[in-house]
Image (cartoon, rainbow, N blue to C red):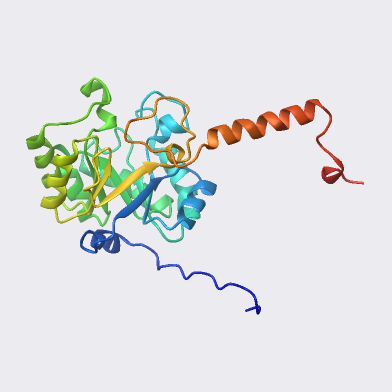
Amino acid sequence: MAKNSTPETPRAARMTVPKFAALKGSGQKITMVTAYDYPFARLVDDAGVEGVLVGDSMSMVVQGHENTLPVTLDEMIYHAEMVGRAVNHALVVVDMPFPSFHLGVHKAIDNAGRILKETRCQAVKLEGGVDQAETIAGLVSAGIPVMAHCGLRPQNVHQLGGYRVQRNEDVLMKDAQAAAEAGAFAMVLECIPAGIAARITETLAIPTIGIGAGKDCDGQVLVLHDILGLTTDYTPRFVKAYADLKSTVVGAVTKYRDEVRGGEFPGPEQTFK
């Protein structure tokens, strides 16, 4: 090492499903970020989060659809493979898109198996509780780790009539308990009152990851584009932007446009002789 060099901070060993689940009792809050491609996933991993989610929200964030339903299994695998190559430390979880886990347990195992075989990711996530307990148990019995997702289920947007806060505590508790008992190693709680989320978190032995579910969950997840202020349409109440890259990007491209039109770019530094 050079005399004046600064030693690199040692990185923790690769996060695994058992390590992730064990964070419940460690007292450390869990951080997850949703990412969809190699460069952003690499940066997220360098930031030291515990989990990276390849979310079916890519249907809206990346593809520009109005909901999560159009994204396909092949598209999820395509993006998950990029993310899997980028991430060296965090646990990588991939959403099972609609209706890839609604076609029977054996088909769900086949679809989830493709995700694990064709990417470097370690687990899948699926929406559901009581109604998906059999599928969760089947996936787990096949050696496929499952993160459950209760509360608001974006894939049920038409049935719900929109993206609404879920307030039925009896239903939410039964869904959460059913998914945990079926073998899920963790659970996303989306858009439910903070008090209900706190009671679910206290009841379950597995970690809860909140998104619009208050601070008493064992961890939190947000979409990277929301964190960076890149959201172009509606921004949910539970989002907090930690940067304003939308303005930065528009400003940079505008300056590039003006310099090209004004004959300033390319300049001598960008020109070969």
Q: How many marks?
A: 0
- Quadrant containing the N terminus is bottom right
User: Which sits in the foreground, 232 or 242?
Assistant: 242
Percent coordinates x, y for residue 135 in the rendering: 19, 44
Identify which residue is drawn at 65% across, 35% down.
252
Tell me, yes or no, if residue 107 can be seen here. no
Percent coordinates x, y for residue 156 in the rendering: 25, 28
Identify which residue is drawn at 43% across, 50% down.
118
Percent coordinates x, y for residue 94 in the rendering: 36, 46
User: Which sits in the foreground, 208 or 98?
Assistant: 208
Identify which residue is drawn at 46% across, 38% down.
225
- Horizontal relation, residue 93 to residue 10: left or right: left
- Horizontal relation, residue 264 to residue 111: left or right: right
Tell me, yes or no, if residue 253 can be seen here. yes
User: Which sits in the foreground, 241 or 159?
Assistant: 241
- Horizontal relation, residue 132 to residue 257: left or right: left
Which residue extends farthest left?
Answer: 170
- Horizontal relation, residue 239 to residue 195: left or right: right
Establish if 61 lies above or below 273: above
Establish if 1 lies above or below 19: below
Which residue extends farthest right?
Answer: 273
- Displayed quadrant of residue 210: top left
Percent coordinates x, y for residue 34 in the rendering: 40, 44
